[in-house]
Amino acid sequence: MAGLGLALLSTGALNWGFFAQHGATGEIALLTVRRPLRSLGLLLRHPRWLRGFAVGLLGWALYVAALALAPLSLVQAVSAGGIGLLALLVSREGGIKLARRERVGVSVAVLGLALLALSITGASTHGSSGSTSLVVAWLVGSATIAAVLVGPAASLLAGGAGLGLAAGALYAAGDVGTKAALAGGNARLFLVGGVLACHGLAFVAFQLGLQRGSVLASAGLASLCTNALPILAGTTVFGEGLPSGPRGVARLLAFASVVVGAALLAKGRTEQPGQLEPERRALVRDAIEANPATVRLDDLERYDRSVLSWLA
């Protein structure tokens, strides 16, 4: 019961932290990787962002404690409801009516993560430490995919979705690298640098995604990837194997559901930037070019940031 309680508290804390950070990033000047120290300072000086970040760290600590007291399947099953809680916060606290596509995407994603947790129940946790080449390939592959998501593919997705997916892929890669480093001993200490790089880049992508998209398209997708990809890595990198029987079917259906849910949440708008109102495009462009350091997302229609994502 203690483990279940900690898992519930962890899920609540993590997702409230995401929600609070998202709200804060909409109230500050435009974050940019070209001025990293200034951007970090903007975040650290905002009280709501600090509260959200601190509560998120508390949620992570509670998650680790829950894993120590309860089965992984139970903790993951509770975590699966996180994106649903995030959707509820957006709707109730944020006063934002979710589109039908978003509601369906959240429901399918929650189903997928629940099936994923079910597929872990009773499954063998034995596996290898994974070959070093496979681990390195996973880290490099994750970084490459993240680069594509924030680069060429970004314009095809909803505002902030590419950054959210990239953050999730990099956070998951960091978890995979951590497991490999711990299992491999001193021979794999060189992976620590890769792990730190993955987490650092993931943090940057996550915060940029929060400011440039909805909380579901950014934090929701990041959470989906962070939950699902390490389990996929367990099968492909660490030789844990696909469960047999109903659990194996559940895992395959789970990954299919997660992919479908993520696709629905990441789907871009049907109108292309060139089709948007010329007056609105000109207004946003002029604001950015005049003084990008003082552009506030609330002034640019906070929950409709597709324009900003391709102009900035």
Image (spheres, rainbow, N blue to C red):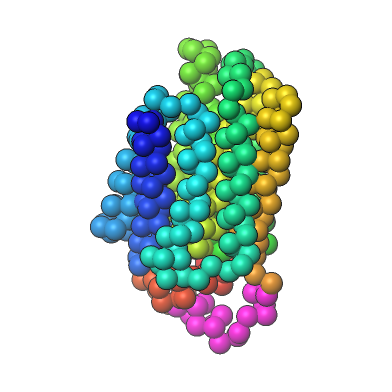
In the image as oriented, which residue stretches furthest toward the bottom? 279
Q: Viewed as shown, does residue 47 lie left or right of 132?
A: left
Reply yes or no: does residue 277 show up in magenta: yes
Q: Quadrant of the N terminus?
A: top left
Q: Is residue 237 above or below residue 261?
A: above
- Residue closest to the eye, 256 or 139: 256
Q: Is residue 302 above or below residue 43?
A: below
Q: Where, by quadrant of the figure, is residue 226 drawn?
A: top right
**Magenta range:** 271-287
- Residue closest to the eye, 25 or 288: 25
Q: Main secondary structure of the magenta part?
A: helix
Q: Where, by quadrant of the figure, is residue 276 drawn?
A: bottom right
Q: Residue at x 40, y 24 (%)?
A: 68
Residue 178 picture location, percent across and down: 49, 26
Q: Residue at x 43, y 27 (%)?
A: 70
In the image as oriented, which residue stretches furthest toward the top? 186
Reply yes or no: does residue 13 show up in magenta: no
Residue 125 in view, yes or no: yes
Residue 218 picture location, percent across and down: 52, 55
Q: Viewed as shown, does residue 55 lie left or right of 226?
A: left
Residue 20 picture location, percent across and down: 36, 57
Q: Where, by quadrant of the figure, is residue 65 drawn?
A: top left
